Amino acid sequence: MSNAIVFDWDGTIVSCEEKIDLAITKLCKQFPAIAKPYKDSVAKKTFSSGWVRKGFTASLPEDYFTYHFGIVAELIAKAKSLVIDSAWSVILSTFTESYLEVNSRILIDLGKLYQLAEHVNLYIVSNSEIKNIKAEAKSLGIKCGVITFVGNTKKYNVAGVESSVIGISANRPNYQATLSRLQKKHENIIVVGDNFSLDLVAPIAMGISVAYVPNLLSPKIIIRYVKKNCIPHGTINDILDILINKKGSLS
């Protein structure tokens, strides 16, 4: 059986700030009452309670996506008297609808990515719709033929805290089902992502190797966990260098 590397898309392979800013602009027009509180919260560097789904912590406010949308979710929920899950549904719908309206930046060295493809199978596993990530990849000149795309993974859907990592729910049925299917096809898989909560908690709980791409918003509790457990971390291109040198392995 072959080996495989599973990459997140937004924030790992391509930037996501442009899409998020556009979605928030639209949401502020749709819900004018949140516009000023949102700007004030960002100016004060206020942290929301994070991404809460079904009453469980699905993600800490640890990157541009969860930080900014976390604030907006709480403001929409308060303004419209909605439960937090409903506010998140509004946000995700707006984000998906405007996904291809702005250009992202490629964060990864494509030459190194293609070099890695010579040794292992490459996958993109994303919350975003597969048609959107394929269209974006094509517009950015990424060779889609060397990558298998898996979209609409719903990594944020949690069903409890029977299994958790540093208090973050690892019980994510949709995402775990996707990873299980890949495990049946490949002898070993490695998951690489920039959002520890959404991308890496579930595979860690499943015993799958991971690599982390931290950012300026990465909480200290996550950085401590990553270092304590000797999880490879660095820029996406640092991770690529490690994987290339070890021919798709972290051991």
Image: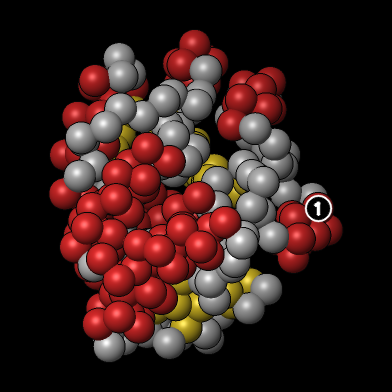
* In the displayed structure image, the side of residue 170 where residue 209 appears, left or right: right
Name the spot of residue 149 as percent of width and height, x first.
29, 38
Query: By what rule are the colours in the image chosen?
Result: secondary structure
In the orientation shown, which residue stands out farthest toward the right? 228
Name the spot of residue 210 as percent of width and height, x first.
61, 49
In the orientation shown, which residue stands out farthest toward the top? 111
Q: Residue at x 45, y 53 (%)?
A: 65
Q: Which quadrant holds residue 84?
A: bottom left
Residue 27, above or below 115? below
* In the displayed structure image, the side of residue 42 where residue 143 appears, left or right: left
The quarter in which the N terminus is drawn is top left
Q: Residue at x 37, y 37 (%)?
A: 18
* In the displayed structure image, the side of residue 78 where residue 228 appears, left or right: right
Q: Amino acid at mark 1?
A: Lys
Name the spot of residue 215 as percent of width and height, x first.
64, 44
Which residue in the protein does label 1 denote? Answer: 227
Does any portion of residue 85 appear in the rendered image?
Answer: no
Identify the secondary structure beneath mark 1: helix
Name the spot of residue 196 as percent of width and height, x first.
58, 56
Does any portion of residue 97 appear in the rendered image?
Answer: yes
Nearer-the-camera pick, 194 or 204: 194
Residue 80, above or below 190? below
